[in-house]
Image (cartoon, rainbow, N blue to C red):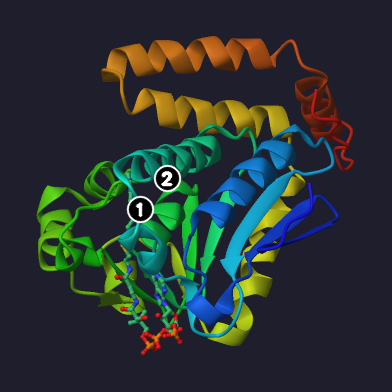
Amino acid sequence: MEFKNLLIDTTDGVTTLTINSPRTLNALNSALLHELECALYGLNLDVDVKAVVITGAGEKAFVAGADIKEMSTMSAYEGHQFGLTGQRVMLLIEKMTKPVIAAVNGYALGGGLELALACDFIYASNRARLGFPEVTLGIMPGFGGTQNLARLIGPNRANEMIFTGKMIDGTKALAWGIVNELFPPEELLAKARECAATMAGVGSVGLAYAKNAIANGLNMTKEDGFRYEASLFGVLFATEDQKEGMGAFVEKRKAEFKGK
Ligand code: DAK
């Protein structure tokens, strides 16, 4: 598929997926969401892709939200389809077997913040501005934002952000645990790629199972989560990666993981 709104580059196992619609601050319209869905589906199946960084083109925005102009004229049916596509994109990221970092280089608003929150963690530029302005438009977050934000930072801070619609800066986002690290704008992408490269070099089956255990375990009791973790842990001992990783340690050499 030819992508009109995305730039995709894969180098040494690390894919940088850039949302490339800077004239509208990378706002998510339905065409862009469809492209994102197809791209992410393909990246998940591509054995050469070990880790993904999602960022926005231009200096101002990661993604300034869903496309308000397009939404303003949608029929109920189109709005429903739009919502379903967006939710599929968010769930696809969460269910990918590869790690996904959001490199938030500016505004991450509404659906843009929801996209970042669907990623495994967020690195941000110290110029980033994050918020959920939906209530100022007469709606509410609808791509998982109420669920993901409240789970991440607790209901009180999530309530404040979602009920006021006010933006917070990178420093507050860091203090509240929305963002893992802040960088100067010119360093952000390199730092995100560097972290992605580290993750691309580890045993990818172990990483995929860890991602699965964390995501699914959050919906279980602690005891069920422990049981689930143990079952995945056991399966890893049937993989070549486990033999290679431990063998390399014992033989004092660098492991060459095959992802199987
Ligand atoms: N949609 C469409 N166009 C946008 C946009 C957006 N979200 N954000 C910015 N743009 C466009 C502007 O209209 C402008 O285009 P022109 O007027 O030049 O043609 C261009 O990008 C540059 O923006 P500004 O001139 O406004 O730039 P400023 O630096 O002055 O301001 C800003 C930057 C980010 C503060 C401002 O652009 C802004 O407030 N943007 C809107 C932010 C926003 O409200 N985002 C949340 C959108 S609501 C659903 C689930 C989820 C959602 C929807 C449905 N279902 C389940 C059905 C999600 C909803 C949202 O995300």
| Residue type at tag 2 | Phe
Which residue does the image show at 31% across and 69% down from the upper left?
173
Eye-nearest disc, 1 or 2: 1
Q: Secondary structure at mark 1?
A: loop
Q: Secondary structure at mark 2?
A: helix
Q: Position of residue 80 (x, y in %)?
A: 35, 39
Which residue does the image show at 64% across and 50% down from the upper left?
35
Structural distance between the alpha carbons of marks 1 and 2: 9 Å
* 75 sits left or right of 56 in the view: left
- Residue 191, compared with residue 1, is above or below; it is below
| Residue type at tag 1 | Met
Q: Which of the marked residues, 1 or 2, is nearer the chain's N terminus?
A: 1
Q: Read off the residue under disc 1.
A: 74
Q: Looking at the image, do the residues carrying marks 1 and 2 touch, with CB atoms under 8 Å apart?
A: yes
Label 1 neighbourhood size at 10 Å, few (<14), some (14-19), many (20+)?
A: few
* Quarter location, residue 44: top right
Q: Read off the residue under disc 2.
A: 82
Label 2 neighbourhood size at 10 Å, few (<14), some (14-19), many (20+)?
A: many
Q: Where does ligand 1 appear, by image quarter?
A: bottom left
Which residue does the image show at 18% across and 73% down from the upper left?
166
